[in-house]
Image (cartoon, rainbow, N blue to C red):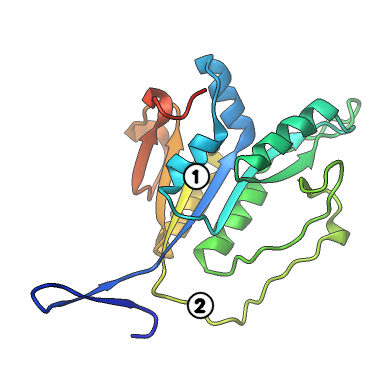
């Protein structure tokens, strides 16, 4: 009972209410493409507030790619993303003469699983180009603060809010659902049975929203 909040109702009955934890995971590249297609200006601060439903997310991350060489305009934009309440997790694109596919799906999938299993703790990553923007290329300098032996609070109801995910995350979202995590998929458009998503509890179409724009 110590892990549950107990409220006495007027009729004398007792209701147990689970604590909630929200994780916000945003694919920044896909979000940028969606906004460009809609030809609107997004207010990220309003978006974060709207999606988190007034709760302080346990994790709120914006995953994106940055140029191989530091770009002042790019880091200025990402600093604005951080001011909206998001932690920026970035990976560098390869040099122009190097043909290599780069994506953030693995980073998002890893954080989703840590959140789903209650193992996510704030951890510092290698930093470059900004005091706060996290660049993940230098693996040897990453200092993870994870304690996998720590007892988890099973009474917490976890909700993962995933904005503009790629299809590559379909399986990890399905697995997170098997851990009991509520999955909310958010994008700018409608979905159908042919979209190959499984285990999604709620779909949110932001294209008709009137509160997240500037």
Q: Position of residue 101 (x, y in %)?
A: 75, 35
The number of callouts visible is 2
Q: Residue furthest bottom?
A: 1
Q: Is residue 167 shown above or below 40?
A: below
| 152, 98: nearer the viewer | 152
Q: Quadrant of residue 210?
A: top left
Q: Position of residue 136 (x, y in %)?
A: 79, 50
- Please give the label number shown on residue 184: none
Do we see residue 164 in this rendering?
A: no
Question: Dot 2, how many residues are within 10 Å of its Cα: few (below 14), some (14-19), or many (20+)?
Answer: few
Badge 1 or badge 2: first in the primary sequence: 2
Q: Residue furthest top?
A: 39
Q: Position of residue 158 (x, y in %)?
A: 43, 61
- Quick one: SS at disc 2? loop
Q: Is residue 106 shown above or below 100?
A: below
Q: Position of residue 203 (x, y in %)?
A: 36, 39
Q: Is residue 199 shown above or below 48?
A: below
- Left or right, 198 with reference to 125: left
Q: Quadrant of residue 35?
A: top right
Mark 2 lies on residue = 152
Q: CA distance from mark 1 to mark 2?
A: 23 Å
- Please give the label number shown on residue 162: 1
Q: Is residue 68 shown above or below 133?
A: above
- Left or right, 135 with reference to 36: right
Do we see residue 11 in this rendering?
A: yes
| 214, 199: nearer the viewer | 214
Q: Residue furthest left?
A: 11
- Quick one: SS at disc 1? strand
- Left or right, 9 with reference to 155: left
Question: Dot 1, how many residues are within 10 Å of its Cα: few (below 14), some (14-19), or many (20+)?
Answer: many
Quarter of the image for the N terminus: give it. Answer: bottom left
Q: Quadrant of residue 78?
A: top right
């Amino acid at each position: 009972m110590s892990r549950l909040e107990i409220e006495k109702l007027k009729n004398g009955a007792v209701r147990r209410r689970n604590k909630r934890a929200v994780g916000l995971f945003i694919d920044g590249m896909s979000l940028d493409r969606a906004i460009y297609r809609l030809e609107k200006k997004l207010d990220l601060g309003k978006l974060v507030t709207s999606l988190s439903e007034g709760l302080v997310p346990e994790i709120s991350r914006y995953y994106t790619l940055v140029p191989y060489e530091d770009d002042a305009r790019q880091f200025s934009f990402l600093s604005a993303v951080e001011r909206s309440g998001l932690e920026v997790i970035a990976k560098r694109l390869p040099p122009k003469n190097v043909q290599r596919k780069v994506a953030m799906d693995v980073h998002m999938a890893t954080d989703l699983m840590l959140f789903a299993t209650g193992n996510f703790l704030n951890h510092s990553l290698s930093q470059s180009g900004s005091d706060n923007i996290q660049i993940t290329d230098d693996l040897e300098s990453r200092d993870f603060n994870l304690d996998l032996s720590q007892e988890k609070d099973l009474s917490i109801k976890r909700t993962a809010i995933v904005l503009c995910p790629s299809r590559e995350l379909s399986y990890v979202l399905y697995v997170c659902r098997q851990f009991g995590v509520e999955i909310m998929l958010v994008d700018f458009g409608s979905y159908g049975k042919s979209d190959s998503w499984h285990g999604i509890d709620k779909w949110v179409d932001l294209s008709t929203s009137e509160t997240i724009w500037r």
